[in-house]
Image (spheres, helix red, strand yellow):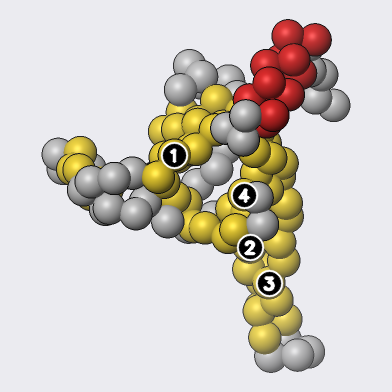
Amino acid sequence: MTVRTDLQLETYNELKDEELSFEAVVTRYNRSNYNSSTGLKTETSANYTGYGVFKKISESKSIPDFYEIKQGDKAFLGAFNGFEPKNKDKISIDSNDYTVGLSIDYSLGNKALFFLIIN
């Protein structure tokens, strides 16, 4: 169970009031093993909710030997409390759907805070 402190809730509400913070739902799709009776692999999905701020990137940038950020991509800094978003996960923010292009753990390994590039 995720516990939010009064300060976290107050900060989130202030950012949301100014339209700077959003709830984000990350959907991860997984293929299961081959089912011989149907002849198919089934696909399952799981949703994970987080909260954060995001901003449209106004110019192309490049992280050498790592990832190219394109104009129109968005930067999202989000708290997911134990869930680690991965490349190609789907993310829905404020009724808009995006795909995770880059995920960097900013929380020193406890999987709580991530910087994402989404498109």
The reply to whether residue 10 is in sight is yes
Residue 43 is tagged as: 3
Q: Identify the residue position indicated by label 4 in the image.
A: 93
- Is residue 3 found left or right of 54 in the rendered image? right
As helix, strand or loop, the secondary structure at mark 1 comes to strand
How far apart, in angstroms, are the residues tagged by discs 1 and 3?
Answer: 32 Å
Q: From the viewer's perspective, is residue 29 above or below residue 103? A: below
Q: From the viewer's perspective, is residue 16 above or below residue 59? A: above
Q: Earlier in the sequence, mark 1 or mark 3?
A: 3
Q: Earlier in the sequence, mark 3 or mark 2?
A: 2
Residues tagged 1 and 2 counted as in contact (Cβ below 8 A): no
Q: Earlier in the sequence, mark 2 or mark 4?
A: 2
Residue 91 position in % (x across, y down): 59, 53
Q: From the viewer's perspective, is residue 93 above or below residue 1? A: below
Residue 95 position in % (x across, y down): 66, 57
Residue 10 is tagged as: none
Residue 55 is tagged as: 1
Amino acid beneath label 1? Lys
- Residue found 40% across the figure and 45% down from its top: 56
As helix, strand or loop, the secondary structure at mark 4 comes to strand
Mark 3 crowd level (few <14, some 14–19, many ≥20, 10 Å Cα):
few
